[in-house]
Image (spheres, grey):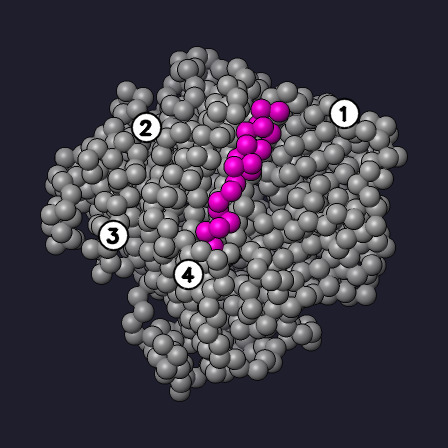
Amino acid sequence: MRTRLAKALSNQKADYLEIRLEDYESTHIRFQGNDMEKISSSQEMGGNVRALVKGGWGFITFNRWDNLENKVKQAIEIATLIGNQKSCLAETEPVVELLQADCGRDFRKIGLKDKSAMMKNYSNIMVSYSSKIQSSIADYTDQYRTVHFANSEGTYIRHERPYLSVHFTAIARDGDDVQMAHESTGSIKGYDSAEQLSSMAQKAAQRAVNLLKARPVQGGEYTVILDPVLAGVFIHEAFGHLSEADFLYEDSRMQSLMQLGKKVSSPGLSVVDDGSLPGLLGTSRYDDEGILTRKNYLIKKGILTGRLHSRETAARMGENATGNARALNYHFKPIVRMTNTYIEQGMTSYRDLFSDIKKGIYARHFYGGNTTFEMFTFSAGEGYMIENGRLSEPVRDVTLSGNLFDTLYHIDGIGNDLKIIESGGGCGKNGQSPLPVTFGSPHIRIQNVVVGGSR
Amino acid sequence: MQQIMGKIMKKVPSGELFRMNYKSIPVDYEMNQLKSINIEETEGWALRVIHTGKIGFSSSTAQNQIDRMIDKAIEVAQLGQTAHFDFPERITPYEKQEVKLYDPSVKEKRLEEMIETGNMIVERVRSINPDLRCDTGISKQEGNIQYRNTYGGSFDYQKTMFSHSVMVQNTMDNDMMMLMESQQWGSASLSLDPLWARLERKIKWSEKVVGIKSGNKPVIFTPKALLVLILPLISGLNGKLVNKKISPLQGKKDQSLWSSLLSLFSDGNIDYAGGSAPYDDEGIKMQRLPLIKKGVLKNYYYDLQSAAEAGEETTGNGMRSSFHSSPSPGVSNLIVAKGKTSLEEMIKDIKEGIIIDQVLGLGQGNVLSGAFSNNVQLGFKIKNGKVAGRIKNVMISGNAFDVLKDIIAVGDEASWVSGQHYFPHIYVKSLSVSTKV
């Protein structure tokens, strides 16, 4: 394969070229209640060519691996229509490496019957939890992907990428009131991570039933404590995306907003993105441009210290590549993405975070989150009122929202209980979703957060 | 395909083969500059079989994998869902003039023309205000769908799509205004004028940032924002969720649940609309299906399997989100019937309220229950019958099933949102608005 790709890339007129070929096979099983809802097996082959000519990118995707030379020529042709400046890519040493998947039990060797029986068991745990459980969804996906990447600088990487996810949704109903709770996990470590999820399935059911008892939260401004899941989502959504240099590098105003060395938060806060942490969902030895992943500080003790780059954004901003160019699959170009993003551990105990809160909200888990640059919004999957330092009644439909720059300054408590979350969902950007990432945090306390709700 | 069908019939008596292939060419501008051109070609095959009464499904991108696909589908069927239906024997041939889907001028559109349009859009945005950042995309697509089943049922059709999207952004200190408008259509001849009119009006309304107090206020949803209220209806009317009794709308057919000003249709027969097709993805004719008529729940929508489970006829709403997924109930084009009130009249009617144009976190909460809670990404304050300016840090929340009971007026004009939703403005009596004090 290496020779075949090298041949297609040789003697072409472009500043930079790369070819990615991918094949994968995958299984999907979904139970709704105790019934098998969907079971399927799919197989996919595809690839792309990306060409850079005078600063313009041409990009071709396809399913058939034949005529690679022609596809390269076509990509160059369209790149030429765009190019009108000097091409700019961060320098890197070419690498040649064959990366084997390092995963315990290979899910391709497990029969459909076994996978299906396991999921049926999880379904049954949810459905039989309470008579209030109206329905449930138990969803299993595995995918084994082999990626061949070669570029015109001599890099060739073959990468095997196993991925597996399990999602639980429990739906509880009391009259017209329907409440849902989700739990999920994702992993690159093989079939073992799908087993022994009984307690997770039960938790989904328990949370859905508990939500029936919760009253909708009253809208307003509160002191909020976020659990590691929601704090992780917050830092990923609200801040992480702003650190992605692809929307900064041509925008001088955004650059001044995100100038390195600037104080951006309360002094206790440090935020890291690290694609080299062993064995996590967002982990990979190389990114999708063949750059080694590494630990990048984004905020260090309240000061903006770094950002995430592709080779192009790094070169355009005169900074180093960070190993953050990632592509969901062959349909897409690599763009700047997060990997494993977390808030570093603080010193405050869980109990002390709560102690001086007169009236607040403890928000846990998440339904989802979203951001447009400075504005963010994310929904908690579970919430409790805090009164005089203690948890009181459960509340629901807790959606937090605000302006990032204000909110980072309002973080005034960071717990000592860092947890990295591997959920079965993923991150979405420019139509590339869900990209496997992790996020994490200790419990954190934020002052003056706007919570939507009835009045 | 006939050869492949032969292979399938040798192994399983009941099966359907679905093939789609399409080619998209997007031309994208970022930060006022032409940034990239893609050529994206996709081909996919899906096989659904009914084997000893159970459903099996497999998919692949490669035609030469067909033997493996057949074996996989049969293996999967051993564990699959019990089939309550069979594939249609006869599929009524469709006449090209019935619903227009294919415009050869889309295919003929040259890259150079698309680049010219892109340059024109950027220049026009910058002529409004040179500080604005403009990202735009012009894209063309053509696709082919083919369907065959083991009973001789078959259909084929071709479809084109041409789309423009414009994102305008203005950053000042710690404030950012972001406005998105787009239009998608099966024909390349659609005028950009309505898009410009919307864009220019909203840029003007955005210039000044104004404060607003928390409270319950009247709200106007623009066509683009209306999905906040419609999304819970889409999931609540889904026949599969109704069968499972997890839809709160289950058992409420023919009941008057919402304002008599609200009528909603799923309509797959509109020329050049994004959701149109002669058939759904199971070979059933698409139709104009009333979902809600004057506030009364008229129909749930079904695919073959969920209809059979419910003891109903399919409504021609069996949709595949890609070739990798088997059909399930989905909507084609969604139409909210127009009303009689102009946007100007609505604004005039409001002493203090807001217009919502874009929200963050659409579909992020418990959609099934009807609950929504969204950050207003782009919204405007109305004060004494006039638009006073843009609002920030505001959240709206409520329950769509309740909010739709109190519609004051429905707009007398509608516009296409993402080529698939034809929505008017909707003016509701009261919504909870939360903001920083």
- Amino acid type for the residue under numbered disc 1: Ser
Instruction: Pinpoint residue A375: horizontal percent, then vertical percent.
Output: 69, 46
Residue, x 62% and y 39% (percent of image)?
A366
Q: Are marks 2 and 3 on the same chain?
A: yes
| Most foreground residue, B193 or A367 | A367
Instruction: Give the letter of the chain under mark 2.
Output: B
Question: What percent of the width, then of the height, locates residue B62?
Answer: 27, 59
Mark 1 Cα shell of 10 Å, populated few (<14), some (14-19), many (≥20): some
Dot 3 lies on which element? Answer: helix
Q: Is residue A201 magenta?
A: yes
Give the residue pinned by disc 2: B306
Quadrant including the N terminus of chain A: bottom left
Q: Residue at x 62, y 25 (%)?
A: A211
Give the CA distance from mark 2 to mark 4: 33 Å
Judge by depth and name the residue closer to the eye, B59 or A252: B59
State the mark number for residue B69: 3
C-alpha distance separating marks 3 and 1: 55 Å
What residue is shown with label 1? Answer: A392
The kind of residue on which mark 4 rests is Arg
Disc 3 residue type? Met
Residue linked to disc 4: A145
User: In screen coordinates, is A77 left or right of A342?
Assistant: left
